[in-house]
Structure formats: C-alpha cells, structure tokens
Image (spheres, rainbow, N blue to C red):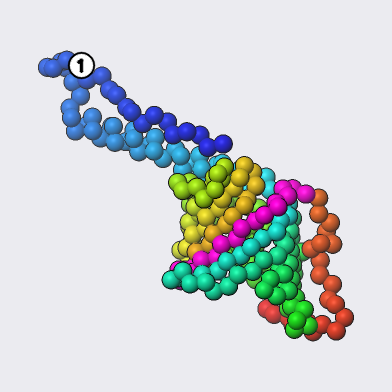
Amino acid sequence: EGASEPDAQVSFSRGHAGSSHDLPMEPFMLIRALALTLLLGLPAAFAADSLDRRWQALRALEASFTQVQRDVDGMLLGESAGEFALQRPGRFRWDYTEPYAQTVVSDGETLWTYEPDLAQATRRPAQAALVGTPAALLADGAALAQGFTITPLQENPGQGLEGWRLTPRDAEGEFSRIDIWMRGDVPVRMDFADSLGGTTEIQLQDVRRNPRLPEARFRFKVPQGVDVVASP
C-alpha cells in the first residue's frame, strides 16, 4: 500500500565558472532545502490517505480482544479479555469475559453497561458518553484526518503490519496519541496514551472484516430482576 519515498536527490545545472548562468550559493541552498522539504512531506500525506481509505472501508468488524492498561510508570493496572462486534455508524458491543463478566453495548443512540454480578444496568446517551473513547474511534467511521494529524510509524511489532500514529488536533482531548496497527485492511492493535501518561493496549484476534451482523446484536434487553440506573 505505502508508496515508497521519492528519491530526494535534487540536482541543478550551475553552468561554468564565470558564466552568467551561475546560480549563487545562497539561493541554490534555499531552493534545494525547499525541494527536500516538499519531498519529505509526501510520506505523511500518503500515510493519512492510506489509513483513512482503509478505515472508512470498515463497515463492520467482529473479533476477540485482550486489553492491557498501564500507568505512567508502566505498572500494570489491569487486564481484560472478551468478544467485540462493530457495525457503523455507532453500533458496537463489548462482551468482557475476564476478569469478570460485563457487557457494553450501543445501538447508536443509547449506551448500556450491564454488570451481571451486581444485577445492574446503566443507561446513558451514547454520543455524550463515548466522546474521546476507543469505542468512539472504532464506531464513528469519519475521516480520521479531520480530527488527527497522521504520521507513519517506523517500528514494526509484527511481520506484515503497518502502523500509524494519530495525534489529536484538539490538545484538550482525553488522549495524547493513538497508534493503530493493521495487517492489510484489518486492524489488529490499537495503543492509546492518555493525557496523564497512562496507556491502554487493545489487541484483536480472529478478526472478521465486514461480516453481516444482525441489528439485534446491538440492542440490549434488560434481564428480569436487574436494576436500571439512568445516567446523564
């Protein structure tokens, strides 16, 4: 996918010594620097286009996931795992199975969080609840370049992966950076760094790209005997 960086070698004909066609050194260096700047800027533009094209082509996604959270010092805060499903725009479902059962599901309008151990479900408006969250990044489907500066990542954590770093244009957001890794057109890993220096790493396994998912998958029916808490 990624276009190779153009050859940045630039040459100019400067004529013979004493010729009226000699190019003075200062303008020559300025022109050369400008040419190099333009050429070196191309990979970032290609990176944004490449990621946006693949990202917006994702209409639905289904996978198992693992999630690891660390503090600013790298100390482990928590690990979780489960199943994940997504259908754009706005519909998703996270079924946590470890360390305990929990379901987070949205039909695009209402976000439900259900905790079977507590026999409690919390209901809130989806749009307000999801601002700045990993779920919103996945479910939105809008052009990423609208909200982020996108640059290619040099390191490669696994064979056949391509990576991009997303830096929010809004410095007041919840995350200071988001790294996305894809294998072809399939996202397999996302790393989020929050404004306090903590990180959340999400790994996706057994990924199914653009499967047909029933709408009922993203609706929540309150089980009998479960308390419902409404949250603004």
Q: Secondary structure at mark 1?
A: loop
As drawn, the residue found furthest toward the right would be 224
Vertically, is 170 above or below 111? Answer: above
Task: Identify the image quadrant of the N terminus.
Answer: top right
Task: Identify the image quadrant of the C terminus.
Answer: bottom right
- At horizontal 19% and vertical 33% (from top left) the residue drawn is 26
- Is 206 on the left-hand or right-hand side of 137? right
Residue 36 image point, x, y percent? 34, 35
- At horizontal 33% and vertical 28% (from top left) the residue drawn is 9
- Is 214 on the left-hand or right-hand side of 98? right
Q: Residues within 10 Å of mark 1 (few under 14, many from 20)?
A: few
Number of residue marks: 1
Taking depth in this image into account, of 183 and 176 the one nearest to the observer is 183
User: What secondary structure is the magenta-colored segment mainly?
Assistant: strand
Taking depth in this image into account, of 165 and 125 the one nearest to the observer is 165
The residue that disc 1 covers is 15
- At horizontal 81% and vertical 62% (from top left) the residue drawn is 217
Instruction: Give the extent of the magenta segment.
Output: 194-211
- At horizontal 79% and vertical 63% (from top left) the residue drawn is 218
Vertically, is 221 above or below 168? Answer: below
Residue 190 image point, x, y percent? 57, 57
Residue 71 image point, x, y percent? 48, 72
